[in-house]
Amino acid sequence: MSLPSKILLWEAGARDGLQNEAQIVPTAVKAELIDRLVDAGLDHIEAGAFVSPKWVPQMADSAEVFAAVHRRPGAVYQALIPNIKGLEAAIASGFRHAAVFAAASETFSKRNINCTIDESLERFRPVMAEVARHGIEVRGFVSCVVDCPFEGPIAPAQTARVTKALIDMGCTDVALGDSIGTGTPTRVQAMIEACARDVPLDRLGVHFHDTYGQALANILASLEVGITSIDAAAAGLGGCPYAPGATGNVATEDVVYMLDGMGIETGVDLKALVRAAWFISDALGRPPASRVAKAMKAKL
Ligand code: HMG
Ligand code: MG
């Protein structure tokens, strides 16, 4: 088994992690979480979302959060955007990295962004034209890459079609989202291999929610087929309000612990990351979902 020597980690805790919280998280807490995570070495970070505040009120203060962050030179702060309105708001707030999000499932697309898959791709075209003028990089997400909460299994060819469409329109790379965390290693590998027929592996990443406890196994399976970019969220926070039953993302500290143990470089200080995971968990008033954060608490 040939594995990479280095991995790019995308930290999703402050966006995916907090978009599904029932309680209001103060702006200053979100900004401190981002600063702590970047200080821990997670220099590719999702810092907010410029989506409709009626749809996701938890992200309504993304501009204020970014204004409060101590921006570290060289770090990549990314805003999630669904349309040109979101892009304009993200640019006005100082973001230079954005991400658009589509789905491999028609029903999920309709529930999450109120349009069909093809309509969403059309919606992204003016976004891509505008970012080209500003020199802004745009990542793509595809949700429901293995299963949909409404439709069940999704054919790998369908995930591959949407992934290729995002790359063709100019996305730098695409994060393949197992939004409800039902994937298992062999199905995940088949899905990645289908995508990799049209898109180079170095432009694909994986984004696992850990609902069924499969995320670390799926990450290892993804590395085995050539993936080198992984999304994760500190403390295992996360979930999509429009993906019923989905729990948090794989915890960043669980991923870093595994990769450290395998000698795969991440550039992350695990203790600082675990401190950040406890910081946000204490603010939310519950322990982290992460096993590593709990195990390491006494050793901090
Ligand atoms: P719509 O209702 O069809 O949109 O929603 P609309 O264009 O008709 O606009 C309706 C209202 O929203 C208008 O305001 C617009 O101005 C406003 P009103 O006139 O009623 O006062 N609006 C906006 N406001 C702020 N920012 C914007 C924006 N756009 C419109 N960008 C829309 C369509 C896409 C806007 C809506 O469905 C939406 O915001 N959806 C976001 C859902 C979401 O954020 N889901 C979670 C993120 S995806 C995810 O978590 C999955 C991922 O993690 C990967 C994985 O795990 O698989 C990425
Ligand atoms: Mg997600």
Image: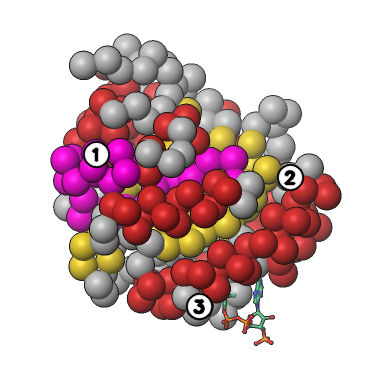
The stretch in magenta equals: 171-194
Any magenta on residue 172?
yes
Please give the name of the residue rendered at 30% of the width and 38% of the height, measured from the top-left corner. 193
Mark in front: 1 vs 2 = 1
Which residue lies under the disc numbered 2?
136
Residue 15 in view in this figure: no
Mark 1: is the Cβ under 8 angstroms from ligand 1? no
Please give the name of the residue rendered at 64% of the width and 42% of the height, measured from the top-left corner. 77
Query: Disc 3 marks which amino acid?
Result: Cys
The numbered disc on residue 115 is 3
Foreground pick, 203 / 5:
203
The numbered disc on residue 189 is 1
Determine the CA span between mark 1 and mark 2: 31 Å
Q: Quadrant of ligand 1?
A: bottom right
Query: Disc 1 marks which amino acid?
Result: Gln
Mark in front: 3 vs 2 = 3
Lower sequence index among marks 3 and 2: 3
Determine the CA span between mark 1 and mark 3: 29 Å
Compared across the picture, whether 300 is left or right of 212 comes to right
Residue 187 in view in this figure: yes
Image quarter in which the C terminus is found: top left
